[in-house]
Structure formats: C-alpha cells, structure tokens
Image: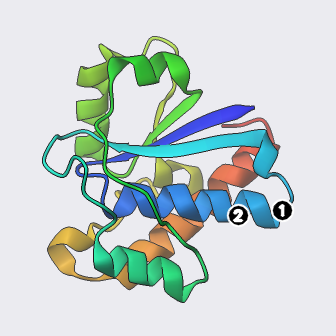
Amino acid sequence: MTRILFVCHGNICRSPMAEFVMKDMAARAGRAGEFYIASAATSAEELGNGVYPPARRMLAAHGIGCGGKTARQMTRQDYRDFDLLIGMDSANLRNMRRICGGDEEDKLRLLLDYTGQGRDVADPWYTGDFEATWRDVNAGCRALLAALDAGRA
C-alpha cells in the first residue's frame, strides 16, 4: 500500500482538495485499496476546523465529498509513516523539511512537479479562485497517479 500525505499551510483548502480528489481517482480506477491518502497542515492556525466552505463546494460540484475532515498539523512521525509527502507550494515544502528534520529518504515533493509545470498550486485563500485551484489539484493528482503507475513517484 502506498501512503500519501498532501500538505498545505492550513489544511482547509488545497491539501484536503488533493486528498479527496486523489481518493476519488483511486476509487474510480478500482484501486482504492492500493492507497492510504490523508492531508495535513504545516501551521497550527486551523487545527480542528473543517474544510473551508468554498473548497467543500468545489469538491461537491465535482461529486466528491469531504465530510468529517478536520485540519491537523503535520508531525515528524508523518515522515516515517508516509511514502510520499506532497506539498502544494514551495513555502509548504520548506516548512515540511523543517518539521521532518530534512528529507534523507527523498519523500518530499511538490504536487505540480508531477505535471512538469514546476510551480505552486494556486492558493485560493488569497485569490478566491477555487476553480484555478481545482484545475491545478486535478492535474497534479492525475499526473501523480500516472507517475505511481509508471514507478516514477
């Protein structure tokens, strides 16, 4: 089983969107049992809060639920427990390295690196553009699933 943790700043927008999009993609492919997928925050600002309503609505508009998800903070133990820890932007990645004490096993990645775009996932917290975030997350998760299939993740 491949264990994937998606990470953003607060764990209420981008990383839960990626978590539930990836779960949906795996389920639709009949492969849900091959993965354990979760998400977390690098900060403590939103701990215990649910998925931000516009993010929840965007997922629902695509037939994806996220009920019961509450924000949690990433820990050093997550580095041991997950095979891949995938940040939404370069600031997340820096904070992930700090929390994990480095990346000696080369497990830390950026989601859009799988698409070859080499940029951050659009942050709707600042732009309000949840459609752009949806496009980035959807493309990133599709590319990640393809990379896993090809043994390139």
Work out which quarter of the rendered image holds the C terminus and state it: top right
From the viewer's side, name the closer residue of 84 and 73: 73
Q: Residues within 10 Å of mark 1 (few under 14, many from 20)?
A: few
Judged from the image, the secondary structure of the residue bearing numbered disc 2 is helix
State left or right for residue 86 relative to residue 152. Answer: left
Asked if the residue under mark 1 is in contact with the one under mark 2, i.e. CB atoms within 8 Å, the reply is yes
Q: Please tell me which residue lies in front, 87 or 61.
A: 61
| Location of the N terminus (image quadrant) | top right
Is residue 23 placed above or below 9 in the rendered structure?
A: below
How far from the left and from the top, in percent, is residue 43? 18, 41
In x, y percent, where is residue 76? 34, 18
Q: Which residue is mark 1?
A: 29
Q: Residue furthest bottom?
A: 61
Q: What's the mark number on residue 83? A: none
Q: Residue, x 40% and y 55% (percent of image)?
A: 15
Q: Three-letter amino acid code at disc 1?
A: Ala
Q: Nearer the viewer, residue 21 or 94?
A: 21
Q: Residue at x 26, y 23 (%)?
A: 99
Residue 138 x %, y %: 56, 69
Of the residues shown, which amino acid type is indicated by label 2? Met
Residue 72 image offset from top left, x and y in percent: 31, 42
Residue 56 found in image quarter: bottom left
The residue at 50%/16% (across/down) is 80
Few, some or many C-alpha atoms within 10 Å of disc 2 (few <14, some 14-19, many ≥20)?
Answer: some
Q: Which mark is residue 25?
A: 2
Q: Residue at x 39, y 73 (%)?
A: 133
Count of picture labels: 2
Gap in Å between the C-alphas at discs 2 and 1? 6 Å
Scheme by which the image is coloured: rainbow
User: Left of 24 or right of it: where is 55?
Assistant: left
The residue lying furthest to the front in this view is 68
